[in-house]
């Protein structure tokens, strides 16, 4: 019924934005900033990538624009919570609202269409075929031929793990996330650390958005992130604070989505399968919270 | 005291006006007739009774959702399941109206009750998980919103779908279950009165009952409440149950008041609007009413501008987002210098 080998590239494809955005959430959460606005940052990145790649006819400039726009929104979120001292969660919700509205306005201004960027000649990020490996019978199609951002996402996992666990910045981030007052007392510049973490988070969100509109599909459509940012949030929660955990969770959630897609048309209730990526994290949270509570009660 | 409270209110109003201008003016300048855009947005909604009716009609679900969010936030809980509760409440109500074999006078109340109980689960489950295991109600409610959406769409597809209709919509809601219209010539229905009543009752509950008092203490300082011997967890959970029931009831009332069939294919967004309403109302149930009417006015104004000019009504979404940030921004609305400029006595540390 299902071609299991054929499913591997599909899972990687669906998981790529979840890994990228999940890492983004992971980094900011370490510094104590729960980035609810990740969904909106992805959306902005998706539009910026399409628009700039269409205008410049240079796919790398498109990618760069996506990264930058994710970071710009992250800077705006930081401005809201640090400068204006607004509530973090409410600002995140506001950022998502603003991104849906803003990208629609932007798309309409450029194309006269509110729904889809079909009239823009935007580009697609290339896929990478690895010489020699691509010719190996079974491993070839699994390892080779994926979008360049898929490889980037997988490579980013150890880098983020290193950043968080082995660098001074990572240590400062975790100290700030654990207890900002104590961190400040030891001389850690709390504000600078949180802003840096948020900006990194925004870059990852922008990359995730670029993958959606310049890899997963080749256009931008209204609200195309469709809740993926929230699944990324879940992936971080399920990762229990580890970058590798976030990767595992993103792959698991991506696999569920990929299987859902491949089962469509087989009479399986696809709506119920679509609910699974949102139910699994809740279960994982309960298990995690319960274990922590048992631990504390000892 | 009163002087300072007035200054705070005046400052909030000033911030709101500034935000509307900040979005409206640049967009108006992109049009050949900027003044037309501005006047259409500001005064268009008052031009005739039908538009005024639209404001009230849009404000009704916002009152339910805003009240629900306000009661939840007051207890110090950050449960965003209101969005999913509103959706599932609408679906549950329509399902009950279609499936329950009840006579006319009982059908609507019974359907609304079923919808409220079913829909509230989106708020109640995160509440229980928080109370029992200490799991973040914020993240789990965000997840359950989408779970509720897809499970709801499954129920719609399998149980309620009308095969004769072209799209994925339910069978027609029976006429017996519809809420009566109040005024000829527009779509205002009984639900609006229920929304006003709910906000009034919410204010009484929060400020005149022991339960509401407990909830405010827990919200203001959970540690203090714990030392007083209050059952902090249960009080937090209670607020989320009440909020979930109100939001889900709002979804059901929206369906029975305005819709022919259940036709939502995505989360309708009323819960998020409810968050903005509650924030504008400073989590006060009675102030939810003007806040909801204000957002309704903005939406009608935005729609009128979209219909007459080349400015999509998403501009209103941008205003809502900015309001959410600026009104909660301590550096703006709690700024002693600005408060003094608006007439507060010096040393105001509200």
Image (cartoon, helix red, strand yellow):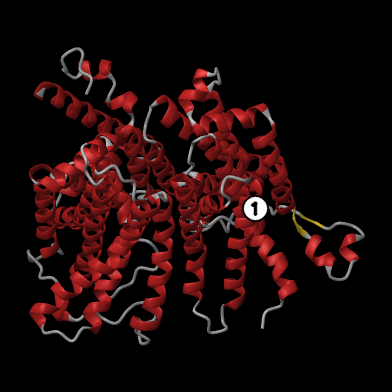
Q: Nearer the viewer, residue A196 or B141?
A: B141
- Of the 4 image quadrants, the one containing the C terminus of chain B is top left
- Left or right of A33: which side holds A137? right
Q: Which residue has dot 1 on it?
A: A247
- Left or right of B178: which side holds B315? right
Q: Chain of mark 1?
A: A
Q: Position of residue A103 (x, y in %)?
A: 48, 47
Residue B287 visible within the image: no
Residue B345 visible within the image: yes
Q: Position of residue A198 (x, y in %)?
A: 54, 35
Q: Residue at x 62, y 51 (%)?
A: A245
Q: Nearer the viewer, residue A30 or B248?
A: A30
Q: Residue at x 66, y 44 (%)?
A: A62
Q: A232 above or below A178?
A: below
Q: A86 above or below B345?
A: below
- Left or right of A189: which side holds A100? left
Q: Residue at x 61, y 51 (%)?
A: A246
Local secondary structure at mark 1: helix
């Amino acid at each position: 019924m299902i071609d299991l080998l054929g499913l591997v590239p599909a899972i990687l494809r669906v998981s790529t934005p979840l890994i990228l955005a999940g890492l983004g959430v992971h980094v900011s959460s370490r510094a104590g900033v729960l980035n609810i606005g990740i969904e909106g940052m992805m959306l902005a990145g998706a539009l910026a990538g399409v628009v700039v790649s269409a205008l410049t006819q240079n796919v790398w400039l498109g990618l760069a624009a996506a990264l930058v726009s994710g970071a710009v929104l992250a800077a705006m979120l930081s401005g809201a919570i640090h400068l204006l001292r607004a509530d973090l969660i409410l600002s995140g919700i506001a950022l998502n609202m603003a991104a849906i509205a803003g990208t629609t306005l932007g798309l309409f201004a450029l194309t006269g269409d509110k729904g889809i960027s079909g009239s823009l000649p935007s580009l697609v990020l290339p896929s990478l075929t690895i010489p020699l490996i691509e010719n190996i019978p079974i491993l070839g199609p699994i390892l080779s031929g994926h979008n360049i951002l898929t490889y980037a996402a997988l490579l980013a996992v150890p880098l983020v793990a290193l950043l968080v666990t082995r660098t001074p910045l990572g240590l400062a981030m975790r100290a700030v996330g654990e207890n900002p007052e104590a961190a400040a007392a030891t001389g850690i510049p709390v504000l600078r650390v949180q802003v840096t973490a948020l900006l990194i988070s925004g870059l990852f969100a922008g990359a995730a958005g670029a993958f959606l509109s310049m890899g997963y599909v080749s256009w931008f459509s209204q609200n195309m992130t469709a809740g993926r940012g929230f699944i990324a949030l879940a992936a971080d929660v399920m990762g229990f604070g580890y970058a590798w955990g976030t990767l595992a969770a993103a792959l698991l959630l991506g696999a569920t989505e990929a299987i859902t897609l491949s089962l469509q048309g087989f009479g399986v209730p696809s709506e119920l399968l679509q609910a699974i990526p949102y139910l699994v994290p809740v279960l994982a949270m309960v298990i995690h919270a319960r274990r922590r509570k048992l631990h504390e009660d000892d | 005291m009163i002087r300072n409270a007035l200054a705070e209110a005046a400052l909030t109003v000033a911030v709101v006006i500034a935000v509307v201008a900040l979005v409206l003016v640049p967009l108006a300048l992109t049009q050949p007739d900027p003044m037309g855009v501005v006047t259409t947005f500001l005064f268009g909604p008052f031009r005739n009774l039908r538009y005024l009716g639209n404001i009230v009609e849009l404000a009704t679900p916002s009152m339910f959702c805003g009240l629900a969010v306000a009661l939840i936030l007051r207890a110090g809980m950050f449960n965003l399941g209101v969005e999913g509760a509103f959706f599932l409440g609408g679906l549950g109500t329509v399902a009950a109206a279609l499936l329950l074999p009840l006579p006319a006078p009982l059908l609507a109340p019974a359907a609304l009750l079923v919808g409220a109980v079913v829909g509230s689960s989106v708020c109640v489950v995160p509440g229980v998980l928080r109370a029992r295991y200490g799991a973040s109600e914020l993240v789990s409610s965000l997840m359950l919103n989408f779970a509720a959406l897809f499970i709801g769409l499954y129920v719609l597809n399998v149980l309620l779908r009308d095969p004769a209709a072209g799209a994925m919509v339910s069978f027609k809601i029976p006429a017996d279950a519809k809420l009566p219209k109040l005024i000829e010539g527009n779509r205002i229905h009984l639900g609006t009165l229920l929304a006003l009543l709910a906000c009034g009752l919410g204010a009484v509950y929060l400020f005149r009952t022991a339960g509401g008092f407990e909830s405010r203490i827990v919200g203001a300082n959970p540690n203090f409440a714990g030392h007083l011997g209050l059952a902090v967890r249960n009080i937090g959970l209670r607020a989320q149950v009440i909020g979930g029931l109100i939001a889900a009831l709002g979804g059901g009332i929206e369906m029975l008041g305005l819709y022919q069939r259940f036709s939502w294919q995505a989360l309708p967004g009323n819960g998020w609007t409810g968050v903005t309403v509650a924030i504008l109302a400073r989590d006060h149930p009675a102030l939810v009413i003007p806040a909801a009417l204000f957002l309704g006015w903005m939406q009608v104004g935005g729609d009128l501008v979209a219909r007459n000019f080349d400015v999509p009504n998403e501009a209103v979404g941008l205003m809502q987002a900015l309001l959410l940030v600026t009104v909660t921004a301590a550096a703006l609305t709690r700024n002693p210098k600005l408060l003094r400029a608006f007439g507060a006595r010096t040393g105001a540390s509200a």
